[in-house]
Image (cartoon, rainbow, N blue to C red):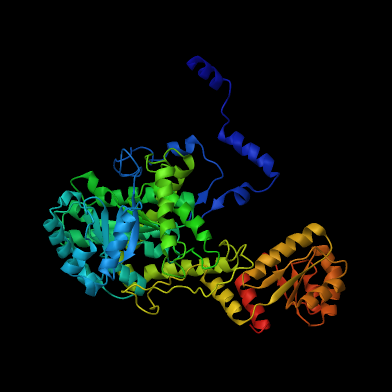
Amino acid sequence: MSNNKEKLFTEFQAPTTQEWLDKIQVDLKGADFNKRLVWRTNEGFNVQPFYRREDVLKLKTPESLPGEFPFVRGNKKNDNVWYVRQNIDAADAAAANAKALDILNKGIDSLGFCIPGDCVSEDFIATLLKDIECECVEINFHTCMKHCVELVEILKAYFEKKGYDKNNIVASVDFDPIKKMVKDGKDTSAMIATAAELVNALRDYPQFRCVCVNSELLNNSGAYIVQELGYALAWGNEYMQQLTEAGIDADTAAKKIKFNMGISENYFMELAKFRAARMLWAQIVKQYEPKCDCSCKMIVNATTSKYNQTLYDSYVNLLRSQTEAMSAALAGIHSMVVTPFDAPYENPSEFSERIARNQQLLLKEECHFGHVVDPGAGSYYIEHLTDSLAKEGWKIFLQVEEDGGFLTSALEGKIQQVINATNEKRHADAAKRKEFLLGTNQFPNFTEKSDGKKPLSCQCCCHQDGESEKGLHTTRLAADFEDLRIHTENTRVPMAFMLTIGNLAMRQARAQFSCNFLACAGYKVVDNLGFKTVEEGVDAALEAGADIIVLCSSDDEYAEYAIPAFKYLDGRAMFVVAGAPACMEDLKAAGIENFVHVRCNVLETLKEYNAKLGI
């Protein structure tokens, strides 16, 4: 058998990279390789259309084994199992406890409790944790920062009363004063000193982390992947510096830091981000000279993004969060939260929370993602992305350090300025459909109504109303289109009638394009099979009660059809030409002013049409 295999392989000669490139160039028929096939990412580097073994041999990422420094291949050697986490509003201790016990029987093994600061007390915690075996599940707490020390002391007393083994408690308290600065531009630096007090209070609990880096906030504010990576590292390093300067040894300080990171829609890039993050964080902690390499492990709770979630066609959010969850699971994270699909417009329902749980359980129990250590290892593409993201993320990290560190940059608003600029650019790209949001700015559901759904504002107890000058702008990418569509629904829904005529292929393509374009604002769109004359089409449109008539034909035929149709309509409805024909200037000279085509700013065009229609 082995001889047959050897003979088989020797019969085929592996093509060289140059031979691949020569073949590709032939198929491109003279087109520019770099323009057609090389992808310039938002992360600041190029991605080639193919990679070979020779591209990976020069990289350092494949050199270590899983569970070994610098942990690029994961923190574990034997499996890839992660905690399936669900967060619970714990304003009512008894209700939160009942919910926790229920979902623990449905696959959850990590609980996140959000506790109002004025509720923190011994009785409250006793009620909240009743019948929950804290040695068997991960427990996480978020409360007002002023009450974190009090909460930790109450938890310690509770664990000791229950007789729990301190080594078996896997937990976290979300203490992160820098988050408040980044989010709202509010100076809370005085509270950073409390971090050392928390760390000292939890020295005897090796798996209880109490200082958090919430770069998930940047993700939900539109940050590019490399920006979240670089800033998260600088954020974590700021806490390492603060803790070690307060007299905490490097091993203890590093083992008390936890990262809460977001997951965006870029599947392979997100997978590579977590691998690069572990590698770079290990290198950063190593500079503090810890006694054990295990202190260099990066512990990450990953949460699927809210930034790209939509109010309309909200079930598409399931597709987004599922691929995001796959990225994080394959990347080897510590725990994960899947954001329910209805989160943009309501407090998640029992149904949406069940689906969110099952999205993880599907990956874990049916797809067996927890069984394979570092599934991305050896993939030339993923190894390249890991290395490239690490290099670009490190540049951001170094820049922050040169500017005086993350705390200084946050207080001065530099971090927020960069993220807000990215958010603004992404909103502009979405308006022009350079960035697609399925069901919102591309292929909307023509007949869907909001049915009273409105964007849900933040209900966090620590939320500060309004946006300060130095704060983050956290508007979801779909929000502008949603506001426009809801306004149209609540005012008047116009009808757009497709006057299709001439070349069959072109009129059908342009009618489909125009229907998708106008339906983004909630317009009622009516397509047609075609008309013999423009007069027949205009009459049919007016009889149907159309507010907008869209002429759909080929560029060559617009010179023949557009002006007669416009004159025959005689202002009885808005007239639009689908496309940007060569004769556009002639059409404009005749009084035609409305055109829809791929270079349009969709959002601004639809706002303009609403204004013309008095909506």
The foreground one among 178 and 51 is 178
Relative placement, left or right, of 576 versus 172 is right
Can residue 154 be seen from the camera position used here? yes
Looking at the picture, how far across and down is residue 277, in whole percent?
A: 36, 51
Looking at the picture, how far across and down is residue 240, in whole percent?
A: 23, 58
Relative placement, left or right, of 597 versus 123 is right
Relative placement, left or right, of 432 versus 513 is left
Looking at the picture, how far across and down is residue 234, in whole percent?
A: 32, 59
The foreground one among 576 and 272 is 576
Counting labels gives 0
Which residue is drawn at the image coordinates 47% and 66% (left, top)? Answer: 422
Relative placement, left or right, of 173 versus 224 is left
Q: Residue furthest bottom?
A: 614
Looking at the picture, how far across and down is residue 29, in whole percent?
A: 71, 44
Which residue is drawn at the image coordinates 18% and 46% (left, top)? Answer: 291
Q: Is residue 330 above or below residue 175?
A: above
Which residue is drawn at the image coordinates 43% and 36% (left, top)? Answer: 57
Q: Is residue 3 above or below residue 302?
A: above
The foreground one among 226 and 330 is 330
Can residue 259 be seen from the camera position used here? no
In the rendered image, the quadrant that contains the C terminus is: bottom right
Q: Is residue 561 above or below residue 70?
A: below
